[in-house]
Amino acid sequence: DVSKQSKKEYLHKVFTGCGYEEIRYWVGILNVYFSAEGSISQAAQQLYMHKNTFQYKLRKLEEITGYDVRLPSQAPILYMTSIFFRDVENDLLLLDN
């Protein structure tokens, strides 16, 4: 059982310097990627974008977080952000306003 405060700290540690809207955007990208079971083509199709554009976004996410979701050793770190974000989304929104 992880406290809401720990979840928020985790999100801010992974997404250093990002506000609510940016975290929400990247978590949305991650949710699509994970729902596609890591398929770049399927995720890109779900987002109505070219797969190269989607791969660019994943590289940008890596620049921001320092983690590459395409690597099995790093994907769980980003997967936890999507789970934690759902639990604390409203709290983060209030903090950003």
Image: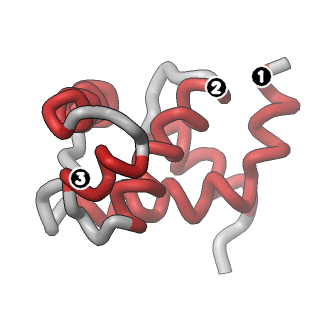
| Left or right placement of residue 94 versus residue 24 in this view | right
Disc 2: CA contacts within 10 A as few (<14), some (14-19) or many (>=20): few
Which mark is first along the chain, 3 or 2?
Answer: 2
Residue 18, position as x, y percentages in the image: 52, 23
Residue drawn where x is 20% and y is 52% of the image = 40
- Between 81 and 32, the one nearer to me in the picture: 32
Quick one: 70 or 77, which is closer to the camera?
70
Q: What residue type is labelled 2?
A: Glu
Q: Counting other residues with Cα less than 10 Å from the Cα at mark 1, is it few (<14), some (14-19), or many (20 or more)?
A: few
Residue drawn 14% across the image and 32% down it: 52
Closer to the eye: label 1 or 2? 2
Query: Which residue position holds label 1?
Result: 96
Do residues under tags 1 and 2 come within 8 Å of each other at their CB atoms? yes
Q: Quadrant of the N terminus?
A: bottom right
Question: How far apart, in angstroms, are the residues tagged by discs 1 and 2?
Answer: 9 Å
The residue beneath circle 2 is 21
Instruction: Identify the image's colour scheme: rainbow, by chain, secondary structure or one colour.
Output: secondary structure
Tell how many labels.
Answer: 3
Give the percent coordinates (x, y) of residue 15.
45, 34
Instruction: Give the residue type that dot 3 points to.
Output: Val
The disc placed on residue 48 is none
Q: Look at the picture and state if 70 lies above or below 38.
A: above
Real-space Cα distance between discs 2 and 3?
Answer: 20 Å
Per the image, the residue denoted by label 3 is 69
Q: What SS does tag 2 mark?
A: helix
Above/below status of 53 relative to 3:
above
- Badge 3, how many Cα within 10 Å: few under 14, some, many 20+? many
- Residue 32 in the image: state x and y as whole percent: 43, 55
Q: Residue at 32% of width from left, 27% of height from top?
A: 64
Amino acid type of the residue that numbered disc 1 sits on in the rendered structure: Asp
Q: Is residue 45 left or right of residue 21?
A: left
